[in-house]
Amino acid sequence: MSKWRKNHLDTSSPEPLEVVIIGNGPSGICLSYLLSGYTPYMKPDAVHPHPLLQRKLLEAPGVSILDQDLDYLSEGLEGRSQSPVALLFDALLRPDTDFGGDMESVLTWRLQKERAIPHVVLGRNLPGGAWHSIEGSMVTLSQGQWMGLPDLQVKDWMCKKRRGLRNSRATAGDIAHYYVDYVSKKGLSHNFVSGAVVTAVARRMPEPSVAGARDPSPLFQVSGFLIAKDQSRQPFSLCARNVVLATGTSDSPARLGIPGETLPFVHYELSALELAIRAGTLTPASDPILIVGAGLSAADAVLYARHYNIPVIHAFRRPVDDPGLVFNQLPKMLYPEYHKVHQMMREQSILSPSPYKGYCSLPEHQLLFFKEDHQAMFQDPNGLQKVFGISLVLVLIGSHPNLSFLPGAGADLAVDPEQPLSPKRNPIDVDPFTYQSTQQQGLYAVGPLAGDNFVRFVQGGALAVASSLLRKEARKPP
């Protein structure tokens, strides 16, 4: 362990860190980039295609975007995000992408180390977070170029790796490697600690200074443990003035809440299917696997199983033509494989048997329970009960953020504290231009926790947080 890490992952460290970032996915990486002194400026000769934004940018020539009024700059922008700062940063990085253009970013980046803010990024996996737990051959939902971070385009990186985009999309494995490489190439590695599990974040008052004065701002105590290569655990405790939650939502898979759900053949991650096929415990001669869910993760599991000729029963509660199904919202030309699954869901239903073998869909079926002898009991739309023999179950119905390290698991931070925290329906309530919690000073949330669910838009949250923290630094007394 480096001297830097040893000093700051030790309770005896006398000086608190300015920032601890919990989560090392795209949000955490982008924020670390901005806090390391990389500063965005408008290119002197650039002309943004949005005339109002161009006029505003010309009002402050030579002033970093981080030092400008993000509220003012983002006013009037429209797009595929509800976050004004996300739209702003995306418009600066990818000026005309929504209109099919490929215009270069209007930003130029300068490394100004005097502006760097000391920070540490804690993550369970390698940099890239949950991208390392996705089966590597899966193709990204978003276009490959939208998965990139500032000042290193995915297509340029893949070209150097002699890789190519597939139908303008990249594989999950490529993106995971891109994020690891990004941290290395941008010189951010010393800020990242992998194998770090946070177990508690608590507020405490700072110790009195030598003069007897007390800093009026409470500090955060971030505690947890590091998992070593031999799987041993080393406790750590950090003191910080600011904490940024960037954990994403993949930590806690959603459950069905039915009897038998804890049986050993019931799983919640696609990796269980991969392992079973690799180990030879699942073959084309096995009983069907049961895939539960009607989202893209379930579709990925169907595609993966069918690639290996594993028989599949696919169950979901909604009708196939429900407009809320994601398949009904994706362009067929860009996502042919997902529309193939949707076609199978429709045509190979148990309600209308088809000549195809190896796949059967159960639309509008409700799972009642699992039995130890590998049986699953369903109720169909007419109330009739049906039993199916299965070899393995994958429950892929979404996931929830795991904020168990916060008091009350962070429930009081949500927009509606009376409802469960949900990235899509009830995210953490943050100021839209700083991403600081409206309930707790010094606590920030970015990415899905703040309602930004696509890599393309999570970077705006990082911009907002970095801008806010830099303003705090400027207000500090000398």
Image (cartoon, rainbow, N blue to C red):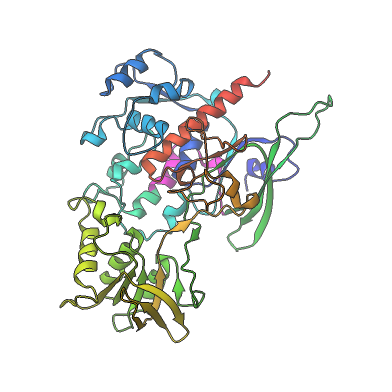
Q: Is residue 381 above or below residue 472?
A: below
Q: Is residue 425 above or below residue 95?
A: below
Residue reaching furthest front?
Answer: 382
Query: Does the rendering let one see residue 308?
Result: no
**Magenta residues (range):** 178-195
Residue at left offset 56%, top offset 50%: 418
Question: For this rendering, which residue is in front, 46 or 367?
Answer: 367
Residue at left offset 41%, top offset 14%: 62
Q: Is residue 358 above or below residue 86?
A: below
Residue 220, image x and y in percent? 68, 40
The answer to which quarter of the image holds residue 234 is bottom right
Query: Does the rendering let one see residue 190?
Result: yes
Q: Is residue 95 magenta?
A: no
Q: Is residue 377 left or right of residue 229?
A: left
Q: Main secondary structure of the magenta part?
A: helix
Residue at left offset 57%, top offset 36%: 438
Numbered marks: total: 0
